[in-house]
Amino acid sequence: MEVLGEDPKVCIVQAEIRKLDELHSVGKVFRALGLEPRACRLRSCDQDPPDCQSYDGSGDLIGWEVTELCDEEAEKINSKAKTPTERVYRDWTVEDLESMIARKIREKDTAISHKMQATAEWPYACVNLIIVSDEIAFTPEMAEFFRGKFEQVDAENIEQAYLLLSYISEETDCPCIRIK
């Protein structure tokens, strides 16, 4: 077998894949908002949180934190599945999703607070949160139910939060719902 490339021993590592996924997710939200990621100078951050950064129309630096909403137990089972019939999924209820989303917002708000305290000069005007889900039982209709529902969640460091249902086909725009 012939190996191509400058250095075939160098492979992309999981952390790099995660960074690319985060950048891709923020780009999807930008496009859903009618923004061009390149025009806003969207890029990954070396040290997170936040995961990515961009500039707004006023020239302020904005942080973007990305997190995933998934059932961790189902993920563990599915990672060991050898056939499609061994795969499982969680049948989410609205109450389960509401609780999980609120927890994600608070967790990320706390992480950002710690980072702000540890950083002498915090460069971001604000930080926005994107909660990405590949859960097929989390339908666009369920996501729409949460539009604006988390405005009152105690999160001092997160200005806006979005749900992004990324399991929808790449040929179409992913549902993107502002929840905070």
Image (tube, rainbow, N blue to C red):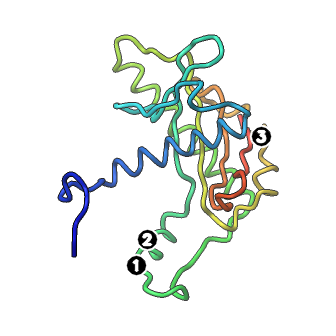
- Amino acid type, label 2: Lys
Q: Residue 164 or 168: which is nearer the viewer?
A: 168
- Amino acid type, label 1: Lys
Badge nearest the viewer, 1 or 3:
1
Task: Find numbered disc 3 in the image and state the secondary structure of the residue it sits on.
Answer: loop
In space, the residues marked 1 and 3 are separated at their CA atoms by 36 Å
For mark 1, does the 10 Å Cα neighbourhood hold few (<14), some (14 to 19), or many (20 or more) residues? Answer: few
Q: Quadrant of residue 39?
A: top right
In the image, is residue 150 above or below residue 121?
below
Residue assigned mark 2: 76
Could you say which disc has been placed on residue 80 in the image? 1
* Residue in the picture at 75% in, 58% down: 94
Q: Residue 27 or 118: which is nearer the viewer?
A: 27
For mark 2, does the 10 Å Cα neighbourhood hold few (<14), some (14 to 19), or many (20 or more) residues? Answer: few
- Number of labelled discs? 3
* Residue in the picture at 55% in, 26% down: 127
In the image, is residue 38 above or below residue 88?
above
Residue assigned mark 3: 149
